[in-house]
Amino acid sequence: MKRLNLALKFSKFELLSIVIMVTLLITALSVGVKGLFHGHEGLYNTSREMPIALLLGAYIFFVVTSTGLCIISAIGHVFHFEEFEPISKRAVFLSIATIMGGFVCLLFELDMPLNMYYFALSPNIKSGVWWMSFLYSFYLFFMICEFIALIFDKHSLGSKLGFLGLACGLAAHSNMGAVFGTLQGRTYWHGAFMPIYFIVSAFFSGLAAIIFFTYISKFVKKRALTDEILNSLMYTGRLLGFAIIIMLFFDIWKHIIGTINYAGEQTVAIISLDEGPLKVNFWMFEVACGMIIPLVLIFITKAKNYTILFISSIICIVGIFYMRYDLMLAGQIVPLWHEIGATSAQHYISYSPSIAEVLVFAGGLSFVGLLYLFGEKVFQLDVVHSKHQ
């Protein structure tokens, strides 16, 4: 079997897309490098009161999606559920592409990324952030090795590497949730449920992403999707509906518990989502786009109308981004001194992303888009193997 296709052919639309994405990526790199050497002040709209915003939310958006894609690939390739095997190889590749897109955003979000070598030279095993970096490094390594094994049809080895990648991915991602959940000073984030929420939302994100990229693969490859892949999409769509229901339960109980059992910062943060400055983001994008509309479309069509399923995945992805973005803002929008009645802490902290932040995020999206486009052209991501070697 021909493992690589190096005789690449692009349509005019694809060439235009490549030019746009390369331009956005170069622009993002230029903006990011300027921020590294001249500082983020005046370039990003973050502040001492709200130090993390769009770019860290974008990093989480990509990394959450990557972990979800890893889970989906493992369902087919590691645990051998036949319905998901036709999309497993693409899910592995996309898990690599999306986490690298997240690293692009994280690189330029950090003030001093060159100091990252301290993580290796002076490990702090009591630090959740250190464990997150350590585990994600191994996660990426195992996923790349798994993909290489799949290219050379070493499916038994690939399954073992996939299991290791899944273990590291779940550990890293739950650890990321714990980084937020252990912050007692930010009661909106604080709580033991955050690691579990991150894993569930990763599964949700991965399902939407694999539906989106699998559907557009027929335009990139210029051939119809096979019956096996369409069958996989149907099962994936139904799982997406189930994941949406779980996410709805998380949101409902977060609101109920947060508004009944607390009288302080967490309640005020939730009010910012319900009727405050984040209400449009929350109700229109998180709830309507992220969950309600896709769930209704999947329920009506039973995930058998693949065009509608594709549209549902797009709507979901938009909503998922706002979930990550709002998670960043809601955790910081209430000033830390609010509960003691400080005069300067009576109002919500305002934030809107700067053009530079938007450009860096667009660069991360473009990086993922370029990797996917070339990956779909070069590798046989659709190959189905009937026997596990």
Image (spheres, rainbow, N blue to C red):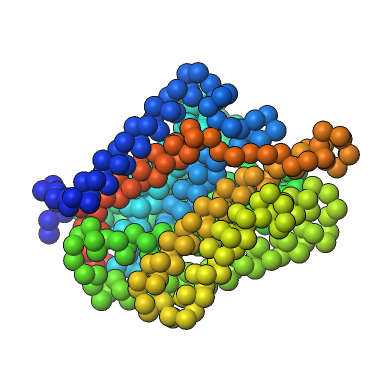
x and y percentages locating residue 203 in the rendered image: 49, 61
Camera sees residue 176: yes
- In the picture, measured across the screen, residue 249 lies left or right of residue 54, that is right
x and y percentages locating residue 340 in the rendered image: 88, 39
- In the picture, measured across the screen, residue 133 lies left or right of residue 379, that is right
Please identify the residue farthest to the right as the structure is shown: 341
Q: Residue at x 27, y 74 (%)?
A: 228
Rendering quarter of residue 192: bottom right
Q: How many marks?
A: 0
Between residues 262 and 194, which one lies in front from this camera angle? 262
From the image, which quarter does the C terminus lie in? bottom left
Between residues 328 and 287, which one lies in front from this camera angle? 287
Q: Residue at x 23, y 57 (%)?
A: 220
Camera sees residue 161: no
Q: Residue at x 85, y 42 (%)?
A: 339
From the image, which quarter does the N terminus lie in? bottom left
**Whether residue 219 is situated above or below residue 128 in the rendered picture:** below
**Whether residue 22 is situated above or below residue 313 in the rendered picture:** above
**Whether residue 121 is situated above or below residue 91 in the rendered picture:** above
x and y percentages locating residue 129 in the rendered image: 58, 37
**Whether residue 29 is situated above or below residue 388 in the rendered picture:** above
x and y percentages locating residue 236 in the rendered image: 41, 70
Q: Residue at x 65, y 68 (%)?
A: 249
Please identify the residue farthest to the top as the structure is shown: 38
Between residues 124 and 241, which one lies in front from this camera angle? 241
